[in-house]
Image (cartoon, rainbow, N blue to C red):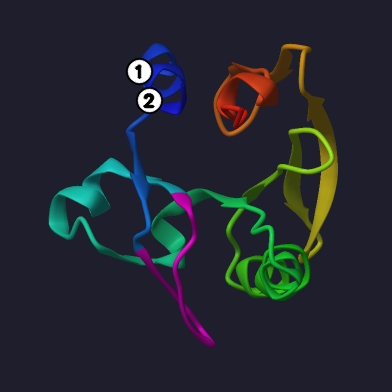
Amino acid sequence: MLDAAIASAEAPAEVLGAVNVILPDGLFIPDIAVVDAAAADQDPVNFDAEAVLLVAEIVSPSSSGRCTDRLLKPPYYAEAGIEHLWRLELEPTPALIVCELENGRYVERAVAEAGRTTLIEKPFPVEVDPGALVRRRR
């Protein structure tokens, strides 16, 4: 979905999973990172925060994982100046929380809910239904 949106917008970016994002206070590994294509050409594994357009975290079902994804990581990403943070909540139903950096903090811009397609404008236009991103176990 992100690859198609990037191609449609002709944005010079790449979608990568589980790469190293080097922040002033250490190294973080987001679930998904959208990075500058030129930076990915130089090193497909390690990225300075300036090369990261978007980080996306899939909230872990464990209590420590939920705390890390919701509370711990966002301030570090914000301090590093990463403009866009998406957080995919899986419970009670899939929802994508879309945040944008404003005055050094993330501000919630949209909540995409399962079963409804939502247009997210930045960093490039993409339509998403969080329910379609998650396959239910039977």
| Vertical placement of residue 121 versus 67, above or below | above
Which portion, as a residue range, is magenta? Answer: 20-32
| Picture coordinates of residue 58, whole percent (x, y) | 60, 50
Q: CA distance from mark 1 to mark 2?
A: 6 Å
Give the labeled residue for mark 1.
7
Name which residue type carries label 2. Answer: Asp
Give the residue drawn at x 72%, y 72%: 75
Give the residue drawn at x 37%, y 58%: 18
Q: Among all residues in the image, which is located at the extreme front?
A: 138
Q: Among all residues in the image, which is located at the extreme left?
A: 42
Assign a secondary structure to mark 1.
helix
Assign a secondary structure to mark 2.
helix
The disc placed on residue 106 is none
User: Callout 2: 10 Å neighbours few (<14), some, many (20+)?
Assistant: some
- In the foreground, 116 or 8: 116
- Would you say 137 lies left or right of 69 here? left
Give the residue drawn at x 76%, y 66%: 104
| Vertical placement of residue 22 versus 121, above or below | below
- Would you say 88 lies left or right of 56 here? right
Residue 26 on the magenta segment: yes
| Picture coordinates of residue 27, whole percent (x, y) | 44, 79
